[in-house]
Image: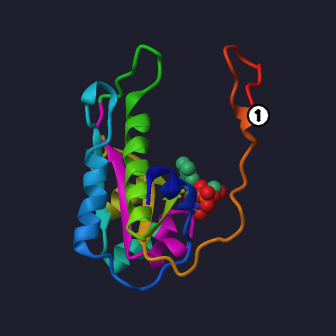
Amino acid sequence: MGVFEVIKKRRSIRAYLEKEVEQDKLLKILEAAQAAPSANNCQEWRFVVVGDKEKRKQLSIAARGQAFVATAPIVIACCAQTDERKMTCGQVCYPIDVTIAIDHMILTATELGLGTCWIGAFYPEQVKEILDIPPHIKVVELLTLGYAQSVASNPKQRLPLNEIIFRDKWGKTCL
Ligand SMILES: Cc1cc2nc3c(=O)[nH]c(=O)nc-3n(C[C@H](O)[C@H](O)[C@H](O)COP(=O)(O)O)c2cc1C
């Protein structure tokens, strides 16, 4: 699959088979995160890969009781070890850098036939306690990973291009 095909194919997966994720595939997915760009190449991202069943169950509770989180054979806690530096544009680097790395992992997983789901609805303090993550570390997102039980067949709900893209100046549509 080409990148564009992978992007179009990816959907959030909320039901997983019990099948394990092969080590070589997992490693490739993590290497995709490592290869991501980051502001000033600071690479503040850190990842806790969770396969332990009991911990996954606890993480699903920390994720506001989203039960499907526990059914994924792998949950990745996507974190940042950061001094909270900002770019000239005023944006804090770490949420952007960690997010790019997550998307690299997600697209690689899709290419490898695996499913993922972003999890932003979680209580970071609970996740830290479950995974022994030190207080100064930020938990940015959780990511579920595994083989999909089913993939949504309905079309992606997205705003039309002419509502989100302007040409040369704000508000001037280009398409
Ligand atoms: C930052 C972020 C946080 C999200 N958090 C959750 C979540 O906690 N639980 C969930 O089921 N889906 C979550 N999602 C998935 C979105 O609901 C999903 O991407 C969106 O509905 C579009 O569907 P699609 O991913 O199938 O294209 C999250 C997505 C993003 C990008």
Inspect this view and state whether residue 164 appears. yes
Q: Residue at x 36, y 61 (%)?
A: 76
Horizontal and vertical percent position of residue 90: 47, 17
Horizontal and vertical percent position of residue 7: 52, 53
**Magenta span includes 79:** yes
**Magenta span includes 167:** no
Horizontal and vertical percent position of residue 25: 28, 68
* Type of amino acid at the residue the image marks with label 1: Glu
Relative to 54, say whether 75 is above or below. above
Q: Nearer the viewer, residue 84 or 3?
A: 3
Looking at this view, name the residue that lies furthest to the bottom. 18
Task: Classify residue 157 as left or right of residue 51.
Answer: right
Quadrant showing the C terminus: top right
Region rendered in magenta: 60-82
Asked which quadrant contains residue 44, the reply is top left
Asked which quadrant contains residue 57, the reply is bottom left
Q: Residue at x 72, y 38 (%)?
A: 161
